[in-house]
Image (cartoon, grey):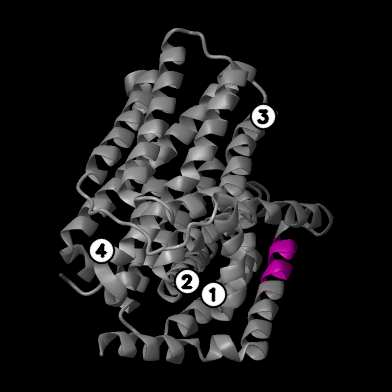
Amino acid sequence: MPKGFESLANVPFRWMIGAVLCFMLGMQGQLLVRSLLAWELTRSTLALGYVNLVVAVPMVLMSFVAGAIVDRVERKRLLIITQTMIAANELLLLVLVLLHMLTFPVLLLSSFIMGVLFPFVMPTRAAMIFGMVGRELLGNAMALQSAIMNVGRFIGPAMMGMLIPWLSLPGAYAVAIGLHLVATITTFKLPRSKSDQKSKKSLLADMGYTFTYIGQHRPIMLVILFGIPPLLLTLPVHSMLVVFATDVWKVGESGLGMLMAMVGAGGITGALVVARLSSGKSRTRWMMSSAVLFGLFLAAFSLSPVFWLALILLLFANMMADMQQTMNTTIVQLLAHNEVRGRMSSMLMLSLGLTPLGVLPVAFAAEHFGVPRTIFGACLILLLTVALFYTLSPTLRKLDAKMAAEAHFETL
């Protein structure tokens, strides 16, 4: 395989990547359709917030349960069952739409169910990858999965936006459900995967052991904590792009579309760059460096007087953000033992689920100081945080050497 795509030589991983792409396209499509349905049913912008809230809250709460279950059962079977239930949930909603029986409370209930099920999908896949490709290609595989997920996030809503006028909203929704079913069928091609867990603890005890394990493994704890500040800044920036487009550069909806395109293109590019760097031994250094560059590019973006320059800066900022997140995820998977790999994946997903918490303080500050100044100030806080991690944590500074030594020991 070409440089950066080495893990695709592994046939099961190719099936995994295909399943991820179909699942992400279907999920992004269904999220857009749900928002349209909520608007048609209520004509209320508040309703759109409710739909997203009832998805986000169970995602955060179920992350603890999902991680423990992923480490207790056969993962391929869990993935098939979960994806089938998601497709069934969406199919029921489609039937109600076709029968003109859908109500807003039912839509909220269906969204809640999706929020409960989704935490079982991505952590399960992440926990399975190590067994497919091994330690040496794990970084490359995680980066390619991240790239495919970004492709899904980027193309999914656009694809659905084109299908709705052509097939109608129910027809486009049926396509999204079909993609979920293809992802489920593809999963049958994956090898069986099970944790090395030997204990007979209760589910509640296994959930608690997640925090015990993190507390006992300082490098994992520090890497997880290091990944949170960039995530807390990413979502507020994306949510405020509309303000930059309309009030700062006055480029309207077309300009906003270009800004969102830079977000998607930056994420895909960043993941592909990580895929080429994955065989290196400086993952922690790249994780910290990309966090610094993310803050610098984003700070420059917030103060850019020219729209076209801002587009370039936003592209590089999101490229660095994805590099940082992918390196962060890969390092945790490399450090974790197989018996807790599902729970560590769920903790990373929990961090992602908490990112909406960053929107409120940033929005509050933006009301008083303006969006550009607020984003610039948040970037300075991020840079200070990274500096403190680097200065005060010899564990992080020496982590690359530690992982290289462990990898060498495993090959002996």
Q: Residue 190: image x %, image y %?
A: 23, 51
| For discs 3 and 4, the disc positioned in front in the rendered view | 4
Which residue shows up at 64% across the image and 61% down it?
232
Q: Earlier in the sequence, mark 1 or mark 2?
A: 1
Answer few, some or many: residues within 10 Å of disc 4's Cα (few below 14, many 20 plus, some between 14 and 19): many
User: In the displayed structure, does residue 251 sit left or right of residue 322?
Assistant: right
The residue under the point 66% across, 54% down is 248
The front one of 347 and 93 is 347
Near-viewer residue (149 or 320) = 149
Amino acid type, mark 1: Ile
Name the residue tied to disc 3: 45
Instruction: Point out the stretch of residues depicted in magenta.
Output: 372-379
Q: Quadrant of residue 71?
A: bottom left
Does the magenta-highlighted stretch encompass residue 2? no
Q: Which residue is mark 4?
A: 132
Q: Residues within 10 Å of mark 2 (few under 14, many from 20)?
A: many
Amino acid at dot 3: Thr
Q: Element under label 3? A: helix
Position in image of residue 389 (x %, y %)? 64, 82
